[in-house]
Image: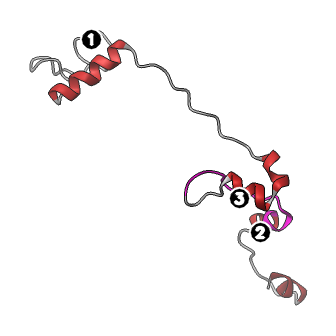
């Protein structure tokens, strides 16, 4: 349609031109992953084996061990339902009252 309009010198706006040109030239970006709207890596290997080498992976989130203070805070909230250590210690200090944090 766009080619026909261009050949007829009819003015038109081609929304998303860059993504269409990228898709037609094989340079489009797709999400590879396990979720519903993503392409699986196995399917990518079947359909476009040459594209597997160009997959850009997101960095893995760093996972750190929970400190003793953090574990105690969570345990206290789960046990009492409140982040406050006592009924008199309800001031807002930026951290959990009574922990020095």
Q: Are marks 3 and 1 in contact (CB under 8 Å)?
A: no
Nearest-to-viewer mark from 3 and 2 = 3
Q: Is residue 59 left or right of residue 7?
A: left
Q: Is residue 92 left or right of residue 40?
A: left
Residue 33 appears at what percent x and percent y? 62, 51
* First of labels 3, 2 by sequence position: 2
Per the image, label 3 sits on a secondary structure element best described as helix
Question: What is the number of callouts on the image?
Answer: 3
Query: Residue placed at 17% from the left, 30% from the top?
Result: 81
The residue to which callout 1 is attached is 99
Q: Are marks 1 and 2 in contact (CB under 8 Å)?
A: no
* Res 47 quadrant in image: bottom right
Per the image, label 2 sits on a secondary structure element best described as helix
Q: Kindly give the residue lying farthest to the right in the view shown.
A: 7
* Label number found at residue 43: 3
- Quadrant of the frame with the N terminus: bottom right
Q: Whole-Å distance between the Cαs marked 3 and 1?
A: 52 Å
Residue 101 appears at what percent x and percent y? 33, 13
């Amino acid at each position: 349609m766009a080619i026909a309009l261009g050949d007829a010198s009819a003015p038109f706006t081609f929304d998303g031109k860059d993504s269409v040109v990228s898709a037609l030239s094989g340079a489009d970006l797709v999400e590879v992953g396990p979720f519903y709207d993503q392409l699986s890596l196995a399917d990518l290997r079947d359909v476009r084996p040459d594209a597997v080498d160009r997959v850009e992976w997101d960095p893995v989130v760093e996972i750190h061990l929970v400190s003793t203070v953090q574990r105690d805070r969570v345990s206290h909230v789960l046990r009492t339902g409140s982040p406050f250590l006592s009924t008199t210690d309800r001031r807002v200090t930026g951290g959990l009252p009574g922990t020095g944090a």
